Image (cartoon, rainbow, N blue to C red):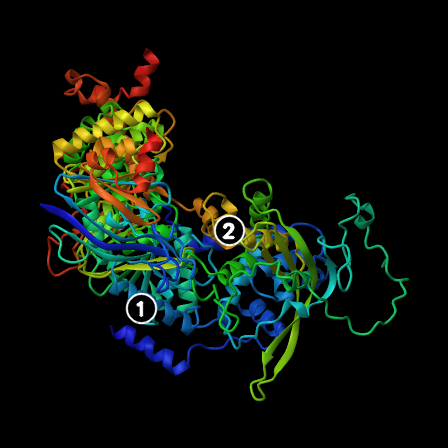
Amino acid sequence: MTLLEASAVETIYGPGCPDCLDATGDRAGTNQCPRCGTVVACAEADLDVAEGEVLGIVGESGSGKSSLAEALALERDPEATVNGEVSYAGHDGNLLEVDYQTRHDLRSRDISLVHQHIRDGLDLEFTGGGNVAEKLLSAGWRSYEDVRMRVRELFEETEIPVARMDDPARTYSGGMQRRVQIARALATDPDLIVLDEPTTGLDVSVQARVLDTFRRVQREEGVAAIVVSHDLGVVRLLADRTLVMRHGRIVESGLTDRVMEDPHHEYTQTLINSVI
Amino acid sequence: MGYVAVTAGEEIIERAADLFEKQRLAGDSEGLDVDQLDDQLGRLTAQAMSEGGLYAPRLAALAVKQAQGDTVEAAFLLRAYRSTLERFDETPAVDPGEMIATRRVSPAFKDVPGGQILGATKDYTQRLLDFDLVDGETADPTEEWEVADEGDPERLTTVTELLRSEGLLHEPDEPDVDDPTDTTRESVTHPPDRDAVLQELARGETGAVTALGYSALRGYGQVHPTLAEVRVGRLPVRIEHPYTGDEVTVTHADVTESEAVVPVYEKREDPQFAFGYGLTFGRNERKAIGMTILDASIQLDSDDEPAENAEFVLDTIDGMDSFGFIEHLKLPHYVTFQSILDRIRAIRERKGTAGKGHDDLADEESAERAPVAEANDDG
Amino acid sequence: MAKETTSQHRDESTGGGTPVPTDSVDAALSAVETDGLSGYNYAYLDEHTKREVRRSMLKAVAIPGHQVPYASRPMPLARGWGTGGIQASLSLLGPADTLKVIDQGADESVNAANIRRLAENTAEVATTTDTTKADLIQSRHRIPEEVLTDDQRLVLQVPITDALRKVDPSDAANRRRHAHKNYGKMWVHLYENVVEYGEINIASRYPTMVANRYLMDPSPIPRWDVPKLDDANHLTILAAGREARIYAVPPHTSVEPLAFEDRSFTVERFPEQACHACGSTDTYLVEVSEEPGTTAGDDDTAASFETRYACNDSSFCAKRRENPNLPKDHHLDRSGVDWGPATPDGGENA
C-alpha cells in the first residue's frame, strides 16, 4: 500500500521567473536559472513510497537529492520556497502545507529524519540516552521507567553499548552517534524514516556496520525509508527502488537492481562506470 | 532570640545610610563643590552621563559626589532620576557630521580633509605622577599662547564619507531615523534591531564595553578594525519650535564619536568594508572605540564569539543590570538555600543507601551516616 | 475592580502625569537637594508608565504564564533588588490600599523595609505585616502561609524570567520554543536529573506548566509554595525589572509542576522538625544556627553551633505563638481550604 506519494515537488531559492523550470535541469545542464539567478534545487519530482519499502535517491552533490528529501521529511528551510503536493497515508491534505503543530506532531510520531550532520540531529551535551528520550518525551511519554525501558531497548536494537547510555553524546564515537540518531528516529515507531547521507563522516568499516544495523532494524520493524546518498554502494545495499537525480531533476528511476545492471540514462551509466 | 531580625528594619537602614554619609565627611578636608567636580573631574562626570543616558553635567557631578566616586552608582542615580522626568519633546535626529570638533584623529589616512586635530590629550606623554599637583594648581600652561581668531570652525568632512563615495563601505541596516526605537521605553527583544543595539551600547558600562571590545581584538572574534577617525566635540541639540515648526538650537552636548572600517567583506561578489560606529556622551574615547568594535562585531551575527553575539553582548553590557544582580547576592537567600539543602540531603541519603548492599537497606540510620565519599576514604 | 476604576480616572484627569519641576537644571537640583521625594509623581512613576505597566499586566492575565515585555524603568532601587515587583506594585496601588512587603518570608528584612518605605513615601499607602489585612502583597521568593483570597493580589519579584534558561541561555531560541510549546529540552533535563540523582534535583525556580500551555518560572519560591498557585483564589503577578518581563497566574488557573508519573514532584520536607518558637509542623521552616548553650542539643557532631528550625513566614509565626492551633484558613468563612502541600499534622510521624 502506498505510504507517501509526491508530485511536482520543487524547492527553489530566489525570486523565480516564468523561465526557471525550462532553463534548468538535465537538458539545460544547470540548476540555476540564467535569467533571474534563482537556484532550482529540485523540481518536477514525482515519487511514491510503499509501506515498508526503501527508496534510494542517488546523485552527486548539488543534484537536489537532499532538498527533495528535506521537503519530504517536513524539514523547513526559511530561505527556500517549496511547492508541490505530498500526500501521506493517515493524513488529509498536502504535507507541504501543514501548520507548525501538525508538522511537529507528524515529525514526533510518523516521519523521522536522520540528519546528515550529527550536530543538526543530536544535542551533544545531553546523554546518548537523553537524545533518544527527547523524542519520546516530546511525543508525550510521561513515565520515567517506560522512557528508560524504551531507550534501553532501542540501544540494544541499534547495537549501542547500553552501558554508555548515560554518558554525554559528545563522548561517543562517530558511528555510535549515527546509531543514536537512528535509535532516536525509530523511537516512536514511525512509518517512514528519511536518512540523509547516512555514511557522512564515518570510516568505511564503520559505515558498513551502521548500514547493516539499519537494514536489519528496517526489516524487523517494517518501517519504510528514503535513503539519500551520493554513494551508489549505500543505495545498492539498502534500497528496493532507486531514483537518480541530476541538476535538480529525477533523470532515471526503477528497481535498484535494474538501475544498477541496466542503466538507461547516460548520466547513470557514467556514475556506475566511475564506481566500477 | 536570633531567629528573625525583629528589630525595626527602617531604623537599621537609616543608620547604615548615615554611616555611609559619614565616610565622606570623616576626613578633615573641605566638602567638594559640585562645580569643582564638573570642572575638574570631567572624565568622571562624562562616564556617569554616558552610562546614565542623561546629558546633565551638574546633575552628574552631584551624582558622583553622592556616590562617593562610584561611577555605576552615579549613573544609576541619574537613570533613576531621569525615569521620573516628564518627556516634553523629542529632538530631531542630528547629523554627527555637524560636529564642531576640538579633537579629531584619523588613523586610516595621513591627510584628511580638515586635517588631524590633536586637541587636548595626554596620549603621547609619559605617565609619571606629577607631584606638583599635590600642592595646589600650577599656572595655566596655555596662558602665553597667541591664538588668532580664525572665525567659526568649519564643518569637517568625515573620513567614512570619502570611503562611502567610492562605494567601499557596506551600509548596515539604516535605523529608522523618523521613529527610532527607544530602549528605555520599549524593552529589547531578540534578535534586536541595530538602533536598539547602538542605544544599549551607548549606555553600556565603560569597563564592560572596553572588555568585550577588547575580546574581539584579542582573538575571540574576527573584527580588527581600522579607525576611520575618532572625534571629540559638540553637537547641537535642537527642538522644533512649537509655533513656527522651525528647528531651534537650544543647547549643545559634548560627545565622542568613533567610526571604523573592518576588512571583513560583507558580500563576496562586491567586496566592501564592514562598518562600525560608536558615540558616547562626554569625552570617553576608550568607550566610543570599544562600542565601534562591538557594533561591527554584532553585525557579523555569530554564536561563535561572545562579541559577535548580540544577545550575549546586550545581556552583559549594562552597568545597572550587572551591578544590581551581582550585588543582589548580598540579600538573604535562606528560603532558596533551605530548598537546596533539602535536595542535596535527599540525594546524599539516596546515594548513601545505594552505596550499601540490599541487606543494609533496612538500617536507614547507618546508611545515612555512610555517604559514598567516606566509604571511599576507608578503601 | 473598584480600585482599578479609580486609578483609571486619575489617569484621565491628570492627562498622563504631573510634571516635575525641570525648568532648569538648577531648579531640578534644588528640588533634589531640599525635599527628597516631594518632587516626584504619585507612586513615583508617571501615569503613562503606570498605565503601560497595567496594560502589560492585563495582557499577562489574558495569556497566563506568557512573558510580556514591558519598558522596565530605572527605579531608585538596584536592579535585582525588586525593581520589577515595585513597578508592578506602584502601578496597582491606590491611596486606599494596604500593602505588605516581605523578603524571603520576613517583613522585617531590610530590603523589604526599603521597598515598603518607597511605597509609603510616594503612594501614601497604609502598610501591614498581617497577611490577611493586605490588599497587595509584594514578596521576594515566598507565598505566605495564610490562604490568600480573591480580593488580594500577590506580586512576586522575579530574577530570571524564563524556565528554559536552565537548558538554553538564548532568549531568541526560547521564545520560539514557547511559541511552539516545545518543551522537549526541559523534559530531557528532568530525565537526566533522575538518571544522575535518582530524583529531580531542582530546588527552587521549579519549572511549571500554566494552564497547560506555557512553561513558567514561578520565581525562586520554594517548591513548598508552588502548589499554592494552582487554582488559587488570588491573582499572582510576576514581575522582573532587570529582564523587563511581566507574567501572571490569574485566579483559578491550573499550575502544574513538570514531573514524571513515576518520579513525582515533591516539596521540601522537614522530618521530625517543628518551629522552635511556635511549634508548627505544617509551615516552611528554615534552619538557624546559634551559639550553643541555650538548649541541650542531642546532636554531638555539631560542636560549635546548634541548628534549630524556625518558621520562615515570620508574621504567621507570631500569630501561631499566640495561638498554636491557628489554621492557615482561620480568616475564611470556610475551613479545610486547600493551600500548599498537604502537610501531616505532626512532624513526629514523618
Q: Chain of mark 2?
A: B
Residue A49 visible in the picture: yes
Quadrant for the C terminus of chain C, please: top left
Q: Are marks 2 and 1 on the same chain?
A: no
Mark 1, Cα crowd under 10 Å, few <14 / some 14-19 / many 20+, is some
> How far across and how far down the image is residue B233, in percent?
70, 64
The image position of residue B45, as x and y in percent, is 64, 59
Q: Please, what secondary structure does the residue beneath circle 2 have?
A: helix
Label 2 Cα neighbours within 10 Å, binned few <14 / some 14-19 / many ≥20? some
Answer left or right for C133 relative to B260. left
Residue C200: tell me if it is visible.
Answer: no
Image vertical order of residue B268 relative to residue B368, above or below: below
Q: Amino acid at mark 1?
A: Asp
Residue under numbered circle 1: C97
| Residue placed under numbered mark 2 in the picture | B300
**Residue B129 image-quadrant placement:** top right
